Image (cartoon, rainbow, N blue to C red):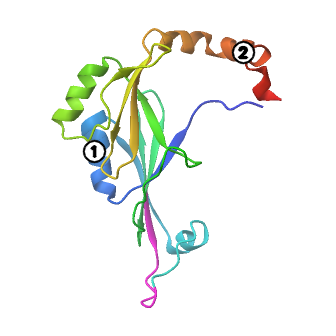
Amino acid sequence: MTARSFSHVGLTVSSFNRTVKFYWEVFGCPLVGVADTPPDRVRGFFGVQPLAPSGVEGSCKIGWIRVPGGGVLEIFEFQPQQPPIAIPWNRVGLTHFSFNVTNLPKWYEYLVSKGVECVSRPERSPRGHSFFFCKDPDGNLIELMDLGYMYYVLGWLGPLGGWIFRRGMYQQYYQ
């Protein structure tokens, strides 16, 4: 059995509308679906309990934002909300997600002009691709990456490379 493709990443956000507007205006990612979750599902599936002492039930608005190329950002706005916490890089768990782009210096200037917080300037990795990090309105880290020619190599030869590396230099990781 193998996975067919990457599907989505889920983000809990503080403001549904602000998040939709940000990803549309900055990255051209449209909202393609919205659902309001019934209180019993918020309580049972997500484990969000009614507010004490008022007993007001929790709510959750879910949206799906399509990224060009096929990935999806699934966004959740819960009420009541818990405050965000900083996620250190060395804590086990999700740290960021990434968008494939071209012309990284132009992207950097564009994001700065839009008022998006960029945490680093574009830099080149030892393996040849370029990247930098920015944040969405809730502080979620987004890596913008320009793979250069490797975008095409990975697209066409990625499955073959995976097969070869599983049997060769990366064999130790599969044991």
Q: Name the residue under label 2.
A: 165
Q: Is residue 58 magenta?
A: yes
* Neighbours of disc 1 within 10 Å: few (<14), some (14-19), many (20+): some
Mark 1 or mark 2, which is nearer to you? 2
- What is the quadrant of the N terminus in the image? top right
Decide which of tag 1 and tag 2 comes sooner along the chain.
1
Residue ranking furthest to the right: 175
Q: Does the magenta stretch include residue 59?
A: yes
Helix, strand or loop at label 1? It is helix
Choose between 163 and 50: the one closer to the eye: 163
Q: Quadrant of residue 32?
A: top left
Q: Quadrant of residue 109?
A: top left
Q: In this view, does 18 lie above or below 42?
A: above
Q: Is residue 89 above or below residue 45?
A: above
Q: Who's the residue at 50% across and 14% down the image?
A: 127
Give the amino acid at mark 2: Phe
Q: In this view, does 92 lie above or below 125?
A: below
Q: Who's the residue at 50% across and 44% down the image?
A: 89
Q: Who's the residue at 42% across and 89% down the image?
A: 54
Residue ranking furthest to the bottom: 53
The Cα–Cα distance between marks 1 and 2, rounded to whole angstroms, is: 39 Å
Helix, strand or loop at label 2? It is helix
Please state the horizontal and vertical placement of residue 75, each as a whole percent of the image. Answer: 43, 52
Choose between 18 and 125: the one closer to the eye: 125
Magenta residues span 52-62
Please state the horizontal and vertical placement of residue 121, each as a whole percent of the image. Answer: 30, 28
Q: In which quarter of the image is residue 119?
A: top left
Name the mark on residue 22. Answer: 1
Chief SS of the magenta region: loop
